[in-house]
Image: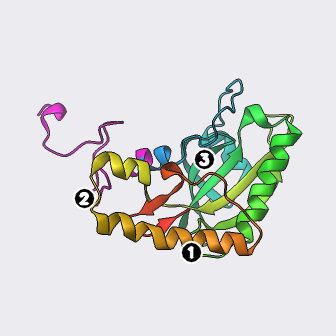
Amino acid sequence: MDPSSSSDPKCPRCGESLPADAVAGLCPRCLMVGAMQPTQAGESAAVTPVFTPEELAPHFPQLEILACLGRGGMGVVYKARQKSLNRLVALKLLAPERADDPQFAARFEKEAHALAALNHPNIVGVYDFGVTQTLLSESPTYFLLMEFVDGVNLRQLLQTKRLTPKEALSIVPPVCAALQCAHDHGIVHRDIKPENLLIDKAGVVKI
């Protein structure tokens, strides 16, 4: 039988079969790629190839690195499984082209400490931060181990459906609560927009 004639739903971006609980008509990998797109305008640098999961594996023995999800304005994000707790995590590395820029390394570390100081159900959690030296680069590799959010960002959601007033208003209180938590810790987000609001499969909003 010709595979192309299969009636199984496919992800419109990559062509993979969709799970029964697919969100916004996309597979989990494409959802996370979209959620991790660059959010800072005007930041550009020569793009260098990212490390493959196989190349990174020896440097993160505590993780099973499953796939590269995409790159954002400052980093590259991988989907991984934390072996000790058998849970999915997001491994974010400072982008290779930024590795030799001390300003970006300092911003990356500042982001890690800011996120780690916040403990709130509507803010993406941080599990670990550190520096490793890979054999693939002379520069140290900064990494951030974060909560894996299986869902879509608000922009993607708006592209697939028109929210009712009740649905739209339900997003506001958790975002306000999360921002208040950040403000209480002296942190100002500065970049709240649909791309930076993630909504998981349970409908929980996370900044």
Q: CA distance from mark 1 to mark 3?
A: 26 Å
Instruction: Using the numbered discs, state the Cα–Cα distance from disc 2 to disc 3 in whole angstroms.
Output: 25 Å
Q: Earlier in the sequence, mark 1 or mark 3?
A: 3
Return the residue nearer the eye: 170 or 95. 170
* Mark toward the start of the polypeptide (1 vs 2): 2
- Answer left or right for 5 relative to 145: left
Figure check: 173 above or below 195: below
Residue 105 visible here: yes
Which residue is found at the position 68% from the left and 69% from the top? 182
| Dot in front, 1 or 3 | 1
Magenta stretch: includes residue 161: no
Residue 48 % position (x, y): 69, 27
Q: Earlier in the sequence, mark 2 or mark 3?
A: 2
Mark number, residue 177: 1
Q: Residue at x 74, y 35 (%)?
A: 96
Q: Mark 3 — residue? A: 77
Badge 2 density bin: few <14, some 14–19, many ≥20, Cα 10 Å: few
**Amino acid type indicated by mark 1:** Ala
**Residue 103, position as x, y percentages in the image:** 86, 41
Q: For the residues carrying marks 1 and 2, which lies nearer the camera in this image?
A: 1
CA distance separating discs 1 and 2: 32 Å
Task: Indicate left or right for 55 with 141 as reference.
Answer: left
- Residue 194: x and y in percent read 48, 51
Q: Is residue 203 visible?
A: no
The tag on residue 33 is none
Which picture quadrant has residue 178? bottom right
**What residue is pinned by disc 2?**
20
Does dot 3 land on a helix, a strand or a loop?
A: strand
SS at circle 2: loop
Which kind of residue does numbered mark 2 sit on?
Answer: Ala
Q: Secondary structure at mark 1?
A: helix
> Which region shows up in magenta?
1-30
